[in-house]
Structure formats: structure tokens, C-alpha cells
């Protein structure tokens, strides 16, 4: 097959200067397109970096928000605990009326009788600071005597009293003495539904509460020690 030679000829109807101008325009647009692409690529890279920075900031803010929410939850739990302890009588001045009611109800529920009690003057065991008398541990010496059929009834009475008396109860001394013997007369009274006193318990206690400024329901301090 013979070689073929292809020759490109300028169209005779297009002047040479027009072809030169057309070539210059093509070169100009090609250069402008390359510059635009490079600018767009650089801008895209900058936007990606900005996006990464914003995402990092958002992640940090989410962690900060989570930390704040956890702290609010913790503080709310402490506030609720404070209010609950205040309502239960652990925080505040000793309420002797509530204490007497707790003694009587506990004795009735735990098969002890001949209940006698005496409160001594309240004492201040400790203060948070010497200059701050509104924050202190208050202690009221308390003596209780009861009679029961069994010594286990007295121990049960003491355990229940720790739960029922508002505040914190500390046992200083407990003495249990026998008041009688098991005989036919005792057995007869038991069959009749009577509950004789075979033992007597003497309990020396300290009834402790915490004096602290009262916290309002909305979480502000009222300044009252109540």
C-alpha cells in the first residue's frame, strides 16, 4: 500500500489574520480555564480544612455540653439528697416531737413495753469552722428503758429505732437484765395472750443531727438554719 501524505490547507475563504486571532483566543481561554481550575481546587482544599476545623469544634462543644449535663445531674442528685435528709430530720435542729413519736411507734411495732425515755440538753459536737456556727454537728443524749419477753425483742427495737428516728443514732451503752423466770405462771399468762416482762433493757444513746443552712427547692440557700 503506497504511503499517503495528508496536507492541511488553510481554507481559502478565511484570512490568515483571523486564524491567528482564533488561535490566540483558544490559547487565552485554555490558560484562563487552567487558572480557574487551580483556584477552585485551592478553594476546595481550604473549605475542607475549614470543615475539619468546624467538626473538631463541634466535637469539643459536644463533650463540654455532655460534661455540663453530667455535672448538673450530679448537683441535682446532691440537692435531692440534701432535701430528702432535711425532710427526714437528719439535717436541722433535733425535732423532739418527731423523736418521741418514733420511739412510741417503734416500741409498739416491736413487742416492747414499759417505754420510758429522757432527753438531756443538746450539745454541739463539732463545727465546720470556728467562725461558722451555722454548720455544726448537734448531739442530744437520750436514755431509753423498755421491757420485753425476750432480749432479741430489745435488739430488734434498737435496730428499728435507728431507721425510724430522724437523724443518726449512736449507741453508747446497752444493758439487758433478767426480770423473771420461766415458770408455770408465766406459761399460763402466755397462753392467755399476755406478754410478761422477762427482761429489761436500758439504752444510752446519742441522737445526732447536722445543723446546716436550709436549701430552698430551687437550689438557693435561704440562710436559715431552721
Image (cartoon, rainbow, N blue to C red):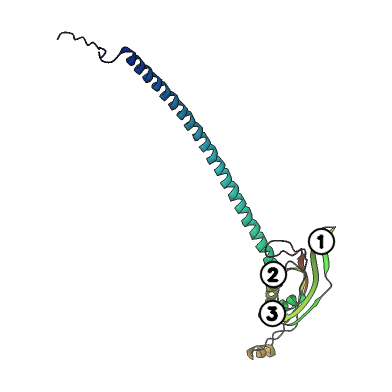
How far across and down, in percent of the image, does residue 81 sit? Answer: 66, 63
The quarter holding residue 137 reads: bottom right
Q: Residues within 10 Å of mark 1 (few under 14, many from 20)?
A: some
Residue lying at 60% horizontally and 47% vertically, measured from the top left: 64
Secondary structure of the residue carrying numbered label 2: helix
180 w.r.t. 168: above or below: below
Q: Kindly identify which residue carries mark 1.
A: 126
**Between tags 2 and 3, which lies in front?**
2
Residue 108, percent from left and from top: 68, 81
Q: Secondary structure at mark 3?
A: helix
Residue 150 in sight in this render: no
Give the distance between the C-alpha atoms of the residues marked 2 and 3, in whole angstroms. 19 Å
State the CA–CA distance, disc 3 to disc 1.
31 Å
Residue drawn 72% across and 77% down?
Answer: 103
Labelled pair 1, 2 in contact (Cβ < 8 Å): no
Under circle 1, the secondary element is strand
Determine the CA span between mark 1 and mark 2.
22 Å
Q: Say whether residue 66 is left or right of residue 36.
A: right
Query: Is mark 2 in CB contact (under 8 Å) with mark 3?
Result: no
Determine which residue is flagged by label 3.
105
Looking at the rendered image, the quarter that the C terminus falls into is: bottom right
Question: Looking at the image, which residue is at 66% across and 57% down?
Answer: 75
Instruction: Give the mark, 1 or 2, whose residue is nearer the N terminus.
Output: 2
Which sits earlier in the primary sequence, circle 2 or circle 3? 2
Q: Which residue, given by chain and number where applicable, does mark 2 sit on? A: 87
Is residue 157 positioned above or below 136 on the image? Answer: below
Q: Is residue 76 left or right of residue 56?
A: right
Residue 45: mark: none
Amino acid at each position: 500500500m503506497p504511503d499517503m501524505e495528508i496536507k492541511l490547507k488553510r481554507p481559502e475563504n478565511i484570512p490568515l489574520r483571523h486564524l491567528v486571532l482564533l488561535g490566540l483566543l483558544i490559547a487565552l481561554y485554555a490558560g484562563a480555564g487552567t487558572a480557574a481550575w487551580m483556584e477552585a481546587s485551592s478553594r476546595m482544599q481550604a473549605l475542607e480544612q475549614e470543615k475539619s476545623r468546624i467538626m473538631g469544634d463541634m466535637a469539643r462543644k459536644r463533650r463540654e455540653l455532655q460534661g455540663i449535663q453530667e455535672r448538673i445531674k450530679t448537683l441535682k442528685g446532691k440537692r435531692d439528697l440534701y432535701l430528702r435528709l432535711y425532710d427526714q430530720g437528719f439535717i436541722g435542729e433535733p425535732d423532739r416531737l418527731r423523736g418521741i413519736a418514733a420511739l412510741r411507734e417503734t416500741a409498739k411495732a416491736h413487742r416492747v413495753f414499759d417505754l420510758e425515755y429522757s432527753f438531756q440538753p443538746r450539745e454541739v459536737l463539732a463545727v465546720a469552722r470556728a467562725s461558722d456556727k451555722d454548720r455544726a454537728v448537734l448531739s442530744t443524749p437520750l436514755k431509753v428503758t423498755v421491757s420485753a419477753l425476750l432480749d432479741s425483742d430489745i435488739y430488734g427495737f434498737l435496730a428499728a429505732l435507728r431507721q425510724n428516728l430522724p437523724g443518726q443514732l449512736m449507741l453508747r451503752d446497752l444493758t439487758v437484765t433478767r426480770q423473771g423466770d420461766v415458770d408455770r405462771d408465766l406459761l399460763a399468762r402466755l397462753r392467755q395472750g399476755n406478754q410478761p416482762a422477762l427482761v429489761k433493757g436500758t439504752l444510752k444513746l446519742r441522737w445526732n443531727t447536722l445543723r446546716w443552712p436550709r436549701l430552698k427547692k430551687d437550689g438557693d440557700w435561704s440562710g436559715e438554719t431552721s
